Image: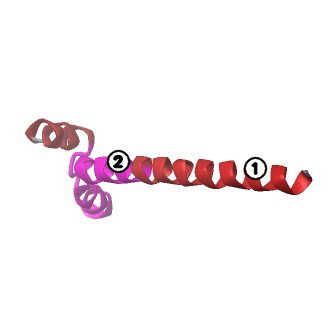
């Protein structure tokens, strides 16, 4: 994690003023946590969508008969 913080300091140097305040608050660690959360929710949503779609397809095929 120390390496990530060093990379974050290199990419987002605190320059002072409003820009430095915003970039100082948003760290690479928080961005990574947000990205991981987004991936997890996307996977969960895809699985739920696939299960619902599968059973809806089966239901519609039964209704067509």
- Which residue in the protein does label 2 denote? 36
On the image, the x and y values in percent for residue 62 come to 82, 53
Q: Which residue is at a point 8% across and 40% down the rendered structure image?
A: 2
**Nearer to us in this view, 20 or 62:** 62
Question: Is 53 left or right of 8, judged from the image as shown?
Answer: right
On the image, the x and y values in percent for residue 22 come to 30, 61
Mark 1 and mark 2: Cα distance apart in space:
31 Å
Q: Is residue 18 magenta?
A: yes
Q: Earlier in the sequence, mark 1 or mark 2?
A: 2
- Which residue in the protein does label 1 denote? 57
| Label 2 crowd (10 A; few <14 / some 14-19 / many >=20) | few
Element under label 1? helix
Magenta stretch, main secondary structure class: helix
What is the residue that sits farthest to the right in this orientation? 65
Q: Nearer the viewer, mark 1 or mark 2?
A: 1
| Label 1 crowd (10 A; few <14 / some 14-19 / many >=20) | few
Q: Is residue 31 magenta?
A: yes
Element under label 2? helix
Q: Which residue is at a point 18% across and 43% down the rendered structure image?
A: 9
| Mark 1–mark 2 CB contact (< 8 Å) | no
What is the residue that sits farthest to the front in this orientation? 65
Q: Which residues are magenta?
A: 12-38
Q: Quadrant of residue 5?
A: top left
Q: Which mark is residue 46?
A: none
Q: Is residue 60 above or below residue 7?
A: below
């Amino acid at each position: 994690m120390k390496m990530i913080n060093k990379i974050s300091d290199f990419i987002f140097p605190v320059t002072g003023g409003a820009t430095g305040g915003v970039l100082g608050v948003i760290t690479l660690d928080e961005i990574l946590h947000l990205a991981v959360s987004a991936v997890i929710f996307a996977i969960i949503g895809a699985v739920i969508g696939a299960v619902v779609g599968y059973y809806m397809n089966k239901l519609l095929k039964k209704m067509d008969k």
